[in-house]
Amino acid sequence: MNLLRRMPTVSLPALTRLFPTRRLAPTPVASFHASFPREQKLMVGLRKKGGRGRYGHKTVGRQGGGHKQKYRIIDFKRAPVQSESSLAEKVLSIEYDPCRSARIAMVAGKARKYILAPHGMEVGQLVTAMRSKPEKVALQTGNVYQLRYIPLGQAVHNIELRVGKGGQIVRSAGTFAIVQQKISGGDRVVLKLPSGQLKEVRGDCVATLGRLSNVDHRNRVLGKAGRSRWLGIRPKPNKQKKLRKKKEGV
């Protein structure tokens, strides 16, 4: 007991700097502003999918454990097909989502909902979404227009492939596509995807202006094996060790 009393008290930030596993890992500045309490109606519990199936066979490998996660219901459509007028929404908060690499934003218009947060979006900002022809295209990050009305060279994300189905491609952190070409008056639009592939999409499909948030996601360093286990990622099997055991007859 006397020994414990003699031990110096160290603050938590000082302790975290002493851990060898996290010493060289970069600590990025938090790029989100959480709002409390969160909208519980837009959050659904997730079941773990790793492990073995009903017959005892391993169906999903290298998954298991990890923290409990809640899935945030994201509005990928932004502009409903039935709506002819523009929808104006105010950004209430920018939050972390454990199920995706990009940040998400809570917006309020007719109702509260989550959307993908582009890089540069700020709390209090007004964003608009429309499927009809705008009088003037406001090149503000987070606005949604049909691809036929977006100027060439503009970066877009959350792109529809079928009208009314919602965004299906370019939804990861820091990604964006570029409007390259318009064919036959904008009926078809050619996009340059993050992979460098050129993809032709219908001009009446909608997309969101700007690049997605959390640009430094690709530069993150986990720092230790335990952090990958927190994410539910199990280690790779050591093939060399298996071959050595097979040769030794173990």
Image (tube, rainbow, N blue to C red):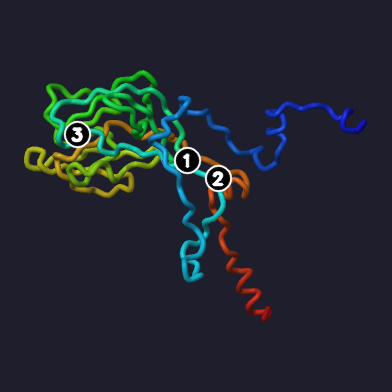
Given residues 134 and 107, the one toward you in this image is 107
Viewport quadrant of the C terminus: bottom right
Residue furthest out toward the front? 41
Characterize the local packing of mark 1: few (<14), some (14-19) or many (20 or more) Cα atoms within 10 angstroms: some
Describe residue 186's horizontal placement relative to residue 122 as left or right: left
Describe residue 54's horizontal placement relative to residue 13 as left or right: left
Asked if disc 1 and disc 2 are in contact, CB closer than 8 Å, the reply is yes
Three-letter amino acid code of the residue under disc 3: Leu
Q: Quadrant of residue 87?
A: top left
Residue pointed to by mark 2: 67
Characterize the local packing of mark 2: few (<14), some (14-19) or many (20 or more) Cα atoms within 10 angstroms: few
Circle number at residue 98: 1
Q: Secondary structure at mark 3?
A: loop
Residue pointed to by mark 3: 152
Given residues 81 and 183, the one toward you in this image is 81
Residue at 22 percent across and 48 percent down: it is 199
Asked if disc 2 and disc 3 are in contact, CB closer than 8 Å, the reply is no
Residue furthest out toward the left? 184
